[in-house]
Image (cartoon, rainbow, N blue to C red):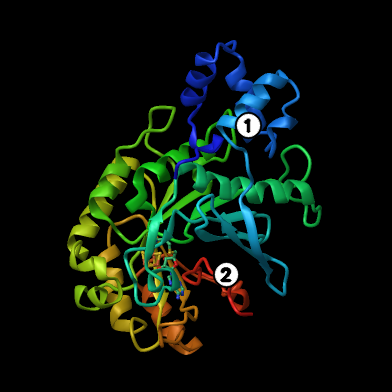
Amino acid sequence: MDTLSPYDLSFPDLQALLEGWGEPPFRARQVWEWLYVHLADDWEQMTNLPGALRQRLAAHLPLVAPRVLATQVSSDGLTRKDLLQLADGETIEAVLMRYERRRTACISTQVGCPIGCLFCATGQAGFRRNLSAGEIVAQAIHFARILRAEGRTSPPPPTRGRGEALTNVVLMGMGEPLLNYRATLEAIRRLSDPQGFRLGQRHITLSTVGIVPEIDRLAEEKSPSGGPLQITLAISLHAATDELRNRLVPINRRYGLDALFAACRRYIARTGRRLSFEWVLIAGVNDSPAQASALADRLQGLTAHVNLIPLNPTPAYEGKPPSRQAIAAFTAVLERRGIPFTVRLRRGIEIQAGCGQLRGVKSET
Ligand code: SAH
Ligand code: SF4
């Protein structure tokens, strides 16, 4: 990544740059608002900046929207998946979901993923590189621009200025966010900046496979107010015994369940936030009442919510989602044990935009 985009700069970075160019102190705020409030996609739109400055900015920090190589929309029109090309030619996927009143961008943090969970298309394709903070932020901005331009009105959407606004961001696309810690955190700060993009931290979810030292690091991060970060942390668990999790999620051999849950307890104690746990349900693999019971044991005393995701198909994994009856037997155990859960609806599957289906290549549909 040689060429920086303006989204790679923090506000102090931008201030320092403009000050170094001899610009008055208010310039940085003007530029920031053009980028994050007005979602400008060309320096020339920033009409209250002197022309010479616009040209200098354009030369130093190209403001180029990600190149969309392909767009697929689900038949119900609610899910849209874009294949985006980065400056160096690498490609990633990002998804926009319009469920009820939410407008959620599911964005990537890496090109590929080094973890290699058996059932995940991203993991199956291997790892290429980390994304920069700017490349992560740009995916959310990309969808925010699309929503604003469309401005649908039914059902009445949350608006900010003209058109619709993005209401949620989930870091659940390609990659493991906590293995690209610095850029991910910078992106979260940028997107939740109250003087910029203004997405509430409670509307941002970071999903991790469970990188224990980085969970501890995350617990220590502070909001601008001085308190802990208010984002939702989701842990991709998928198994409640080490024997099974070692097979499904290779990183479990390094950070086993005892270590992971100890980190989860520390995280809750530090932040006061409820945790989410993701569980991809695979027929005959991790959908038994015994696993549900082991999960309930693990969650005893934790403030947590479980998201059950019936397996989505991927090219290199043979598993199948469980039958309705098997899902009901699994959830009955959680219900009995008082564990709150949701069974995630299968959406966007026919365009391979579901959880774990992102590959960053054109899909044959
Ligand atoms: N690397 C992070 C974030 C990206 S994956 C993580 O693993 O948490 C986002 C979610 O999709 C994870 O919970 C992951 O386990 C799930 N997932 C992966 N493959 C899937 C599949 N084939 N079907 C359903 N969910 C899947
Ligand atoms: Fe990586 Fe998450 Fe996929 Fe596992 S599920 S391979 S950690 S992206």
Q: Is residue 349 visible?
A: yes
User: Tag 2, which secondary structure?
Assistant: loop
Mark 2 within 8 Å of ligand 1, using the beta carbon: no
Q: Nearer the viewer, residue 278 or 68?
A: 68
Q: Is residue 166 visible?
A: no
| Left or right: 220 as drawn, with respect to 6 | left
**Residue positioned 42% across, 33% down in the render:** 223
Query: Where does the image place residue 320, in percent across and percent down from the top left?
Result: 45, 87
**Mark 2 = which residue?**
353
Query: Where does the image place residue 217, in percent across and percent down from the top left?
Result: 28, 43
In the rendered image of this protein, does residue 163 appear above or below residue 318? above
Q: Earlier in the sequence, mark 2 or mark 1?
A: 1
**Mark 1 = which residue?**
58
In the rendered image of this protein, does residue 243 appear above or below residue 221? below
Mark 1 within 8 Å of ligand 1, using the beta carbon: no
Quadrant of residue 106 within the rendered picture: bottom right
The image quadrant in which ligand 1 is located:
bottom left
